[in-house]
Image (tube, rainbow, N blue to C red):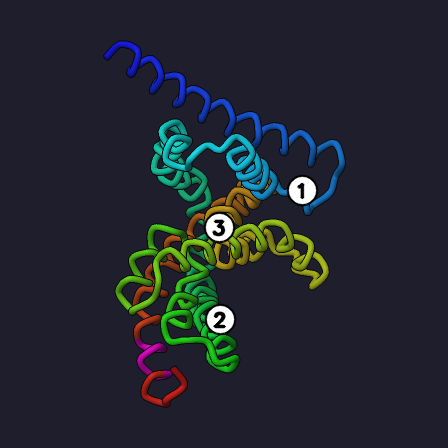
Amino acid sequence: MAERWGAAALTMALGVAATALAYFGARWLQRRSGWLLLNPTLVAIVVLIALLRAGGVEYERYHAGGRLISFWLAPAVVALGVPLYLQRAEIARRGRALLASILAGSVVGIGSGTLVAAALGASGEVVRSLAPRAVTTPIALGIAARVGGLPSLAAALVIATGILGAVLGPAVLRRLRVRSRTAVGLALGAAAHGMGTARAAELGEVEAAASGLAIGLMGVATAVLAPLLLALLTWLGWI
């Protein structure tokens, strides 16, 4: 029994150490190189997958330690309320514009993926899995299951969307000459959810507050609008 507990503890420790080293190593590499494509989350995922495959380690064994890190996701999300509170006056002043932006972002986020997939002849399950790709993973899983999509596919699409948005989002916004810090944060949170918010937090407190607000509002808007838009596409015979 003691040996089994010792092996389990060692596996958990290795999982935590491997995750931390991969992420902070990737972060150091990005800062040294200045390359936006070397996103720490993306690099860490690739490195960990390569290590697990090379070592023949099953995901369940790795996750025994990885879940100790994922446990802190919930407190981290709650902590987003701090910059939100500090910027409450700015948010209240732009309240109508923020709500209109989130509504538009939710419609575009749902429609862009589903319409393209439907036009390319994707199956109904795939189209429905694309509907919640612009919201954070826990919400996306619930929406995908409710509308008849594949939760596992939805999770993969959410992660891919978040990484792409975090890597390319700031550069695209600069190219479009978006100078409002609130608009930048809102765009990153609405398009790239948690990963976009992590990137927004690096840009400043205002961006972090707007991005954190966007995550929550996008989740609510998508949960309401996704079933309605998918029902419309079904009625039109597109899926």
Q: Percent x, y for residue 167? A: 63, 50
Magenta portion: prevailing SS class: helix
Viewer-proximal residue among 228 and 63: 63
Image quarter for residue 200? top right
Q: Residue furthest front?
A: 56
Residue under circle 2? 113
Q: Percent x, y for residue 116? A: 52, 77
Q: Amino acid at mark 1?
A: Leu
Mark sitting on residue 38:
1
Q: Percent x, y for residue 160? A: 52, 54
Of pointers 3 and 2, the one earlier in the residue sequence: 2
Q: Is residue 119 above or below residue 69?
A: below
Image mark count: 3
Q: In what element is the residue under mark 2?
A: helix
Left or right: where does residue 2 sit relative to residue 213? left
Q: Percent x, y for residue 132? A: 40, 63
Q: Residues within 10 Å of mark 1 (few under 14, many from 20)?
A: some
Q: Residue furthest left?
A: 1
Q: Quadrant of the C terminus?
A: bottom left
Q: Quadrant of the N terminus?
A: top left
Q: Amino acid at mark 2?
A: Gly
Q: In what element is the residue under mark 3?
A: helix
Residue placed at 40% from the left, 36% from the top? 76
Left or right: where does residue 39 sit relative to residue 131? right
Of pointers 2 and 1, the one earlier in the residue sequence: 1
Residue under circle 3? 211
Q: Residue furthest bottom?
A: 236
Q: Amino acid at mark 3?
A: Ser
Mark 3 and mark 2: span between their CA atoms?
21 Å
Residue placed at 46% from the left, 47% from the top? 194
Q: Which residues are magenta?
A: 228-233
